[in-house]
Image (cartoon, rainbow, N blue to C red):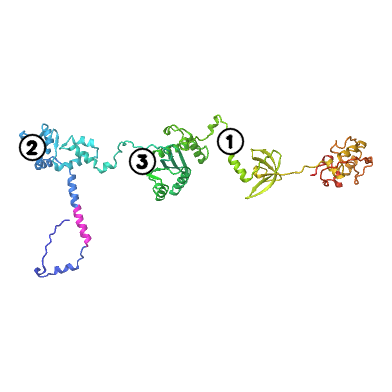
Amino acid sequence: MSYDFMLEYIPTREFGAADILSRLTRNTTRPNEDTIIACCQLEREVKQSAVEALENLPVTFQMIQNATLKDKVLQEVISYLKNGKWPNTITDDLRSYYIHRDALGIVENCIMLKDRLVIPYCFHKRILQQLHKGHQGIERTKSLSRSYVYWPGLDEEIKRFVQGCGKCAAVAKTLPKTTLSSWPIAEHPMQRVHIDIAGPVNGIYYFLIIDAYSKWPQIYQVNSITSASILNCIADFTSQFGNPELIVSDNGTQFSSKTYSDFCKSQGIIHKFTAPYHPQSNGQAERFVDTLKRALKKLEGAGTTKQILQTFLKTNRVTPNRSAQGKSPADLFVGRRLRTELDLLKISKPHSNQRNERMEQQFNRQNHAQERSYKIGDPVYAKLYKLNESFWAPGIITKILGKVNCEVRIENSNIFKAVKSHANQLRSRFVEAPQKALDISFDYFDLSPSSVSDASNSRACIAEPDLATSQESASSDTSQQTTPCTNMADPPNQLLPEASTDAPNDNREPVTEQTEVHPELRRSSRRKRPPAWIPDYHLFKRRKDVGNPQV
């Protein structure tokens, strides 16, 4: 502010006569307290700005002269230089000057070190600011100072001043890397696993889990990278291979959430974070992220993203790794080699085919099992399943697939044509074989084959003509010649002599009945039943249809 007030307290009794002007103060507005405080603060800021402006002014030789005259140490050095004698005991303040005493000189009441001006203590800070005005580094600032000024400990003060410069520190280069401190070598699988998230690659994220001991990769495709989605993947991994002892991850929000922390505590898993934006600390996972991205680009077009991922994982897990004792991840993680298409190049070893006979005997004894066997062509009933219901359907075995499995062709079915069935899903089906025409005649006329054979020697057997349903074919058949038959049992397509009432044939000779009877007549043991074709209209069948009940 422009004015400086002095306040003095005067008691009321010492006041003189009140004048008119003293009463006018009641009508004026009193300033707010905040305004008074602001004015005081403004006064201090104005004074500080004035001081800084003076400090930013360049230091001149006349200013150094005046300051040198007031500096006790420099005045003492000037007196020693003029007398040419230095004391036997040198203090710390004079030690640097004593060492350079041969290079010191006096110029217009100022001390010079060769062509460098010795600066008094009061101007050290201002000179350092001028030297570092271009914000150069430590060494370049030192080089600049050696051309103009000197005072004891100048190099050390320049180093501290430059290191303390905030603007220089904000844009400084990264220091050389510190010595490497690697993770302890894992001694067994699941001792330590590294996790990370890659992507998005074509809109898909990949969650990676890498075992530090075997280098076994487990990768999940996820559409979101929330804590719930990541925990589902970790829960699936632990359900297959168990809980790891230690999980290493970066500081992603998925891994630093309370949900994830509670999961690790409930499963007894130790979780460690790496330094933010320092992927080298999680090198196991970060290196594999790069390998995965390159593989996805190389296999692009070889199938869907799921198929590409499966191909990459299958190949990686069976490939020997130099950093994993020269063995494949599968050998160290699951204890065996995974079988691939390349194993077809090896000579296959014969299998023992040894079964658990003890278990079979126990099962057979408890279930009262009985051995059943089928062969090709056997008629069976096969149990079929449709809409959670089962039913038996007739069929015929067409192929034997093993000891207890068969292929069955289902009859009269448009839905089930050929099914694979276990022996427990089959039961035998008994089909009665169709009877021949001669056997049907024996049963119908109550004859035996031996009696018919003797009677056929003394009579002629008339061959049955091919009858037709039309009148023209019937008239043409009557003109055919008869052929003798030597034995009744030889021609299977001939009928026993019987006159037809519907189509009489005048050309046929009457058949005489054999009167000779054997003393012991052997009757057929076959059960008698009426033939399916014996009615009169069946006599018009053609010769090739005789004995076929389906016609």
User: Of the numbered discs in the image, which one, if any, rests on residue 242?
Assistant: none
User: Of the numbered discs in the image, which one, if any, rests on residue 78?
Assistant: 2
Disc 2 or 1, which lies upstream in sequence?
A: 2
Numbered disc 3: secondary structure: loop
Residue found 60% across the figure and 41% down from its top = 360
Q: Could you tell me the amino acid type at mark 2? A: Ile
Q: Is residue 381 magenta?
A: no
Q: Is residue 144 left or right of residue 70?
A: right
Which residue is more in the foreground, 384 or 180? 384
Disc 2 or 3, which lies upstream in sequence?
A: 2
Our reading of the magenta stretch's main secondary structure is: helix
Q: CA distance from mark 3 to mark 1?
A: 57 Å
Q: Which residue is mark 3?
A: 278
Task: Specify the quadrant of the image occupied by residue 475.
Answer: top right
Task: Specify the quadrant of the image occupied by residue 29.
Answer: bottom left
Q: Could you tell me the amino acid type at mark 1? A: Gln
Q: Would you call the spot at circle 1 few (<14 residues within 10 Å), some (14-19), or many (20 or more)?
A: few
Rendered location of residue 132, percent (x, y): 22, 40
Q: Residue furthest left?
A: 83
Q: Could you tell me the amino acid type at mark 3? A: His
Which quarter of the image is occupied by the N terminus? bottom left
Q: Would you call the spot at circle 3 few (<14 residues within 10 Å), some (14-19), or many (20 or more)?
A: few
Asked if the residues shown at circle 2 and circle 1 are in contact, with their CB atoms under 8 angstroms apart, the answer is: no
Numbered disc 1: secondary structure: loop
User: Of the numbered discs in the image, which one, if any, rests on residue 354?
Assistant: 1
Rendered location of residue 383, percent (x, y): 66, 46
Q: Which residues are magenta?
A: 32-45
